Image (tube, grey):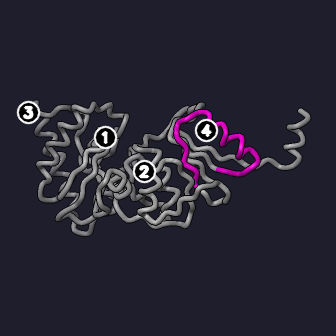
Amino acid sequence: MDIVVNANAPTPPEKSTTIQEPFYWNLIKRLHKDGTSIPLANFLARLNGRKESDWIIVSPIHCQATHNDAFITAYGDDLALSEEESVAIFSLIKDFLAEEVSEWLYYSPSLWLARLGSMPSPKSVEPHTIFHQSLLPHLRSLDDTHAWLRLFTEIQMLLAAQSKEGRQASTKVNALWFWGQGALALQGHKVFCEDHHLSATLRAFNVSCVDNITEADTIVLLNADARTTESMRDWTKNKSCNWYWNNKTEKVHAQTVWQRIRGIFS
């Protein structure tokens, strides 16, 4: 059983990986068959009233460049990008990519949704999975024509020019990363969810939503309510399950009969 909680763990890890929209990312990662790339864009678009299409996620990043390569050094919360700064860059990019993107949806300072027009869908991965890695192999594999590689470079030049002329709202962002593409391929898990809007969105993707938690392959979605979380902890104390918090992952093993007996008399 997988339990996905829309909250941080009570005892946070010493070091956590930056993931934007971790609750939905954790959910889609559990539902999707192919773990190499998480198709989050279409799900978030549908959750916000848009039709499923060629949606991708566009995220502001900061890159450190070398003479022939680049590395992502900051993304998401690490950028400390304000709403005002992000909206200003979003507006600039929206105008710049008017031909390549047919529709935009501003979601958060570090996550924008774009419905592709003339551009092919990129074969990309999540930015947090390639932190401080060589970007060149990933850029070259985004599509067969290298259109995304050229666009990545053009956007870098645009942001650099804006920064040099003092017209850019923030110097924290010097590139963009494109990811979250693709269709959701279901594994057959059932989902228990008390959020009616989220349940309706899941059903639109043919996810089976259940009213009771009874099966081992059920994914349970919880909100940030501490009492609900503690009740689930108590209910699953003799069951093997995985807990996915916004900042931490826990694997809990079912207690053996001997461990339960020892617990009674300890």
Give the residue at x 37% y 48%. Answer: 127
- The residues colored magenta run 219-241
- Would you name the residue on which mark 3 appears? 165
- Would you name the residue on which mark 2 appears? 197
- Residue sitting nearer the eye, 188 or 49: 49
* Amino acid type of the residue that numbered disc 4 sits on in the rendered structure: Thr
Please state which of the two labelled residues, at mark 4 or mark 3, is closer to the viewer. 4
Magenta residue check for 224: yes
Q: Is residue 249 above or below residue 192?
A: above
Of pointers 4 and 3, the one earlier in the residue sequence: 3
* Amino acid type of the residue that numbered disc 1 sits on in the rendered structure: Ser
- Would you name the residue on which mark 4 appears? 228
What crowding class fits label 4: few (fewer than 14 Cα within 10 Å), some (14-19), or many (20 or more)? Answer: few
Of pointers 4 and 2, the one earlier in the residue sequence: 2
Q: CA distance from mark 1 to mark 4?
A: 28 Å
> Considering the image in quadrants, where does the C terminus appear?
top right
Q: CA distance from mark 2 to mark 3?
A: 45 Å
Give the residue at x 31% y 40%. Answer: 108
- Would you name the residue on which mark 1 appears? 108
Of pointers 3 and 1, the one earlier in the residue sequence: 1
